[in-house]
Image (spheres, rainbow, N blue to C red):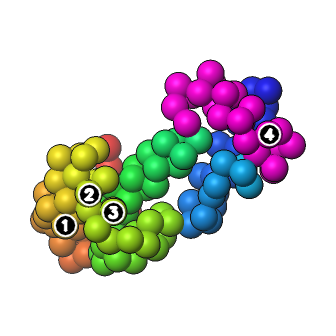
Amino acid sequence: MKAKITFLKKTILANLRHKWTVKNLAHSVDVSPAHLQKLFKEEMGISPIQFIKQLRLEKARKLLETTFLRVQQIGFEVGITDQSYLDREFKKKYGATPNQYREQFREKLEAKRQNPINDSFVQ
């Protein structure tokens, strides 16, 4: 059963934009929705839907820190098209709205834009 959860985690991460439901997740690993809920809770400690939300918010956070994409575009990239939902859930998790959070990284982003050196060699 652990292999099924691992498969689902990889599938979800690769397709964050998809409108996931417990039903279609369960179908993809050939178990009932109720059984999937149980397996996920045992393995991850949270429901599949909570896991998806966590992945989406984490990806949004990374995009806010590293790109100039508009918040609306970031929401689309991570599968959250309701701006107020994104704002509310992001603030619950990170203590700031996406725009407020991005402000913390604006200076770093601007410097990167002005000097786009591949900083992967600098540690």
**Which kind of residue does numbered mark 4 sit on?**
Ser
Nearer mark to the viewer, of 4 and 2: 4
Magenta stretch, residue numbers: 26-47
Contact (Cβ within 8 Å) of mark 1 with mark 4: no
Could you say where residue 117 lies in the image, as x and y percent from the top left? 32, 67
Would you name the residue on which mark 1 appears? 99
Inspect the magenta stretch and tell me whether residue 36 lies in it: yes
**Which kind of residue does numbered mark 3 sit on?**
Tyr
In the image, is 36 to the left or to the right of 12? right
Inspect the magenta stretch and tell me whether residue 92 lies in it: no
- In the rendered image, which quarter contains the C terminus? top left
Residue 88, labelled with which disc?
2
Magenta segment main secondary structure: helix
Nearer mark to the viewer, of 4 and 3: 4
Instruction: Give me the residue at 17% from left, 53% from top.
Output: 96
Nearer mark to the viewer, of 1 and 4: 4
